[in-house]
Image (cartoon, rainbow, N blue to C red):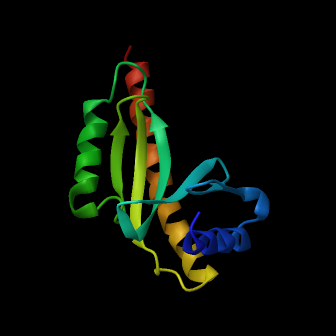
Amino acid sequence: MTDRLQRLADMAIGIASAEAVVEEAIGFTLNVFDTALNFFETHGDTGAFYCRAVIGRFGNDGCPCEFAEDALKGNFFWRGTEGATLSLNENDNAVYLTDRFDKDAFDDEAAFAEYINAFLRSVYDWQARLDGYVATKEASR
């Protein structure tokens, strides 16, 4: 993990606790209640970090059209995702919310905590939507 990402991990420990942060080779995971926020960087994008969370998963029969339509609308100029992007991993039917932010975006724990809270609001909103679509689809079987 780079020094800048380690600094972010240290801020996460200050916001949450050492038990809530799991450091890894390429980043760290911040566990907030039942949601894991993965912070990492990529080799090709040296000016940014990424934050990613799994929103949920679909069954083997795929993504309901209604959710896909809402996800596309939410991604349109990031109006429904607070600037993040929704995506679907075809290998395990997981829906992700991913955000890219500048490496120098947070000067202190308060600013980082504000970011985490805003990202979590979007995660929880999309989790509720996905849960609703999955429940509706299962009830219609």
**Relative to 14, does residue 73 appear above or below in the rendering?**
above
Instruction: Compare residues 22 and 141 and report the one nearer the observer.
Output: 22
State the count of labels.
Answer: 0
Point out residue 32 in the picture as x, y percentages from the top left corner: 65, 56
**Relative to 20, does residue 66 appear above or below in the rendering?**
above
Q: Residue at x 62, y 75 (%)?
A: 7
Q: Quadrant of the N terminus?
A: bottom right
Q: Quadrant of the C terminus?
A: top left
Q: Residue at x 41, y 60 (%)?
A: 43
Q: Image check: 140 left or right of 53? A: left
Instruction: Compare residues 96 and 139 and report the one nearer the observer.
Output: 96
Residue 116 sits in quarter: bottom right
Q: Residue at x 77, y 63 (%)?
A: 18
**Relative to 68, does residue 121 appear above or below in the rendering?**
below
Residue 107 sits in quarter: bottom right
Instruction: Compare residues 102 and 88 and report the one nearer the observer.
Output: 102
Q: Residue at x 30, y 29 (%)?
A: 64
Q: Image check: 20 left or right of 30? A: right
Q: Image check: 7 left or right of 82? A: right
Point out residue 113 in the picture as x, y percentages from the top left corner: 59, 74
